[in-house]
Amino acid sequence: MVVSAQDLQDRAQAALHSAGASIESAEAAIRALMHASLIGVDSHGIRLVEHYCRMLRGGRVNKHPKPVLRQTGAGSAMLHGDDGLGHYAAYMAVEAGITMAKESGVAGIGIEHSSHFGAAGAYATWGAEQGYITFVTTNTDAMVALFHGAERFHGTNPLAFAAPVPGSRPWLLDMATSSIPMNRVLLHRSLDEPLPGGVAADKNGSPTTDPHEAEMLLPLGGEAFGFKGAGLAGVATLFSALLTGTTRDPNFIPMYGTDNIHEPRNMGHFVLVVDPAKFVGAELFRQAITGYLSALRGSPPGAGKVLAPGDREWAEADRRDAEGIPIDPDTARFLGYR
């Protein structure tokens, strides 16, 4: 069913408050989830509210976190998320990164003792909206096979990059390093719709399109070029877990399918903020990215329209803002639409 964006936001925020989330952490979560729901990434949008509410009530996620930033250098810091909703810690890290990058040019913020934070692109976008190139990544619990592998090893491990564009929304690349995110498998299960080919495998590691049989995902690139996705997944683990001293992919308490909903998962994330003014200069960068995107979009099309990263997402956001946001049956029931 399709519902208005404002009503969906209000109901989801009320659900988080009902589960005990603090005003600050609930607002951060809804802000990030609405970003995903508006741009069409439904797997990481409002449908996650039910899961977060269960984790808040179970004790896995701290209802009233007090994150603490520890600056370790001119351009580096660690942020302790106090096991709260990961969205809250991630927005705080971007904000701290911006403050530091104004002085140092580049700032890297490692996040520890956090939890699932939804779509990494929400935080990269916010940094770009403030005028900074922003990179955000996280590792997650193992659910993706290695190239030619037959067991779960990496998480879906997203990489999100965003850059400011004068007079326009940011250039945005937000991608999982798996063929698809596991939340999309869960969405297809809810809708009882088949998966695309070459994105998931059953318990034996054999490719399947049945969402009910899918036990693991395939890395980006599928059966032929999955070594690329598997390598990029390792980049996310390098920055988010190894550099921050947090949980590696195979050692996570599973996000789903476990009775352990009281123990924090100590998730790690990583944020990198770059101030263009400290490199080529703010004005020359604005001219450069404007010219680059103009040339990109003006490139002769082949089989379809040439788009810059983010073009499809922002067009979808405009459409959904005007026409409403589709939600799956499980989310509709949880939020009281049925």
Image: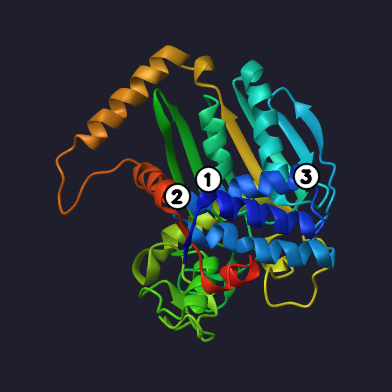
Pointers 2 and 3 in contact (C-beta within 8 Å)? no
Q: Which residue is mark 1?
A: 121
Near-viewer residue (227 or 194): 194
Q: CA distance from mark 2 to mark 3?
A: 24 Å
- From this view, report whether residue 87 is shown above or below residue 135: below
Label 2: which secondary element: helix
What element does badge 1 sit on?
A: helix
**For numbered disc 3, what is the local secondary structure?**
helix
Seen from the viewer's position, the closer of residues 302 and 249 is 302
Circles 1, 2 touching at the beta carbon (< 8 Å): yes
- State which quadrant residue 209 falls in: bottom left
Residue 30 vertical position relative to residue 204 in the rendered view, above or below: above
Question: Which residue type carries mark 1?
Answer: Gly
Mark 1 burial class by Cα count in 10 Å: few <14, some 14-19, many 20+: many
Any part of residue 39 in sight = yes
Question: Closer to the camera, 92 or 31?
Answer: 31
Return the x and y of residue 120 as percentages of the image width and height: 57, 48
Label drawn at residue 216:
none
Q: Which residue is mark 2?
A: 39
Residue 242 visible in the displayed image: no
- Residue 84: give x, y in percent of width and height: 79, 51
- Residue shown at 36% from the left, 64% from the top: 225
Query: Sequence order check: which comes first, mark 2 or mark 3?
Result: 3
* Residue under numbered circle 3: 23
Q: Earlier in the sequence, mark 3 or mark 1?
A: 3
